[in-house]
Image (cartoon, coloured by chain):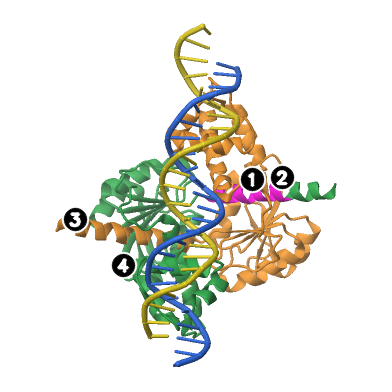
Chain colours: A green, B orange, C blue, D yellow
Amino acid sequence: MERFSSISMAVVRRLPKYHRYLSELKKNDIKRVSSQELSKITGFTASQIRQDLNCFGGFGQQGYGYNVDDLHQQISKILGLDRIYNTVIVGAGNLGQAIVNYTFFEKNGFVTKAIFDVNPKLVGLKINDIKVHDVENLESFVRENGIDIGIICTPKNQCQKVAEALANGGVQAIWNFAPSDVNVPEEIIVENVHLSESLFTVSYLLKEREELLKSKKY
Amino acid sequence: MERFSSISMAVVRRLPKYHRYLSELKKNDIKRVSSQELSKITGFTASQIRQDLNCFGGFGQQGYGYNVDDLHQQISKILGLDRIYNTVIVGAGNLGQAIVNYTFFEKNGFVTKAIFDVNPKLVGLKINDIKVHDVENLESFVRENGIDIGIICTPKNQCQKVAEALANGGVQAIWNFAPSDVNVPEEIIVENVHLSESLFTVSYLLKEREELLKSKKY
DNA sequence: TAGATTGTTAATCGATTAACAATC
DNA sequence: TAGATTGTTAATCGATTAACAATC
């Protein structure tokens, strides 16, 4: 997807981290925080934190720092967590179920409206009180229920077909866990979670580390 | 974790993608590929691809391009996929089960040696032929079985304790799915998969897109 | 007020892209 | 050989860090 905003993805991907750490601070009843303190917690530099936040406005106060509650709320709003998103999960396997059962998403406004699967044995069942539908009806369901986000938890060989159904039904975004890229119109946001890429990175770092240790021996 | 290698993480994180696309090409019986063709497939620039590959050696041939089989094997080796890693999964919930059942990892050398859980009802069961142990025994199991990678699929409130047991047992890397950071000695590789950060990024982009469309109306 | 800390500009650093000579 | 495409250097671009005036 093409983006028109001036905010770089590097900044955008740090926002959820700020949000998470501010939630922690809130939970611990901490009322104010400086960029320096945030730096210690997050591992980002204080300078970067101030730069990032200033992309969206001057949330701080000279000599004081940031009000935790206020900043948390501002970032929630920036992230679009102040509204409801309708989602469907496609693929009722372990991964799909893991997401259905993860209440944190629902608490933050992501409502699962239905689950879809090809397996006729699963169709009609309920998982965490959400009905499993036949994937045949995916496109029409998406269209008729104003689904915003389609979550793909199918095997690789199904994901393109599913993505097309989601796109035709009118989703605005696809969250894809299948280990493959999906091809959809440019205006649809696609976020891939490629677990194997993450694991292979671990593998690379392990090997690198081992070679380093080996070379140190001599 | 601190790194000593000169290869930047930006490059490292592209390697699994190259690996995946080359697997596809191999599967389609394609024997040679140029950086330009790879560019079309991957979306990276041809220049970047050549730069990336040259961090590790001159795998190509002027006037010809790259031999797909050869390059695939080279990258496998660079990623450390030419050896076996012993892993344990901690947390036998849906996510843990999803990973156990995902044969792709096993095929690439990541062998699940055991699953751990706190729930006494699960202890002793087998999931995909792998025994579920009591999390009490995690540290000693890791030590006695030469576990390389610990995979954390527990809720947030358990993950630090689990990470410490893994670290004390002697794992070299932790793959963490809990929505929280873990604190372990610097020499241990930690790779986080924070799903909510990924979803919140989607949410941000949705909101951005909506605001853009709104502003275009006027 | 004095001290602290932001918001913001300028400097630096690193990553990506462009260009092209080398060479298959 | 001529054409194609790499490997590699140099140029550009973007992101991070440093510095400090503004100001609470």
| Residue range highlighted in magenta | A195-209
| Secondary structure found at label 2 | loop
Labels 3 and 4 positioned on one and the same chain: no
Q: Tell me the amino acid under the disc marked 3.
A: Lys
Nearer the observer, disc 3 or disc 4?
3
Q: Position of residue B145 (x, y in %)?
A: 78, 56
Q: Which residue is drawn at 58% across and 67% down?
A: B181
State which quarter of the image contains the C terminus of chain B.
Answer: bottom left
Q: Mark 3 points at which residue?
A: B216
Which of disc 2 and disc 1 is earlier in sequence? Answer: 2
Front residue (pair B149, B183):
B183
Label ID, residue A84: 4
Res A128 seen here: no
Nearer-the-camera pick, B144 or B175: B175
In the image, residue C18 sits, relative to residue B131, either above or below, namely above
Badge 2 amino acid: Ile
Instruction: Please say whether residue A56 is one of the residues in the magenta stretch.
Output: no
Residue type, label 4: Ile
- Residue B70, given in percent of the width and then of the height, sits at 62, 28
| Lateral position of residue B58 relative to residue A16, left or right | right
Decide if residue A54 is in sight here.
yes
- Do marks 1 and 2 share a subunit? yes
Task: For mark 4, give the secondary structure.
Answer: loop
- Residue under label 1, please give it: B106
Depth check: B12 or B76 in front? B12
Residue B110 x %, y %: 66, 48
- In the picture of the structure, the residue carrying the numbered disc 2 is B84
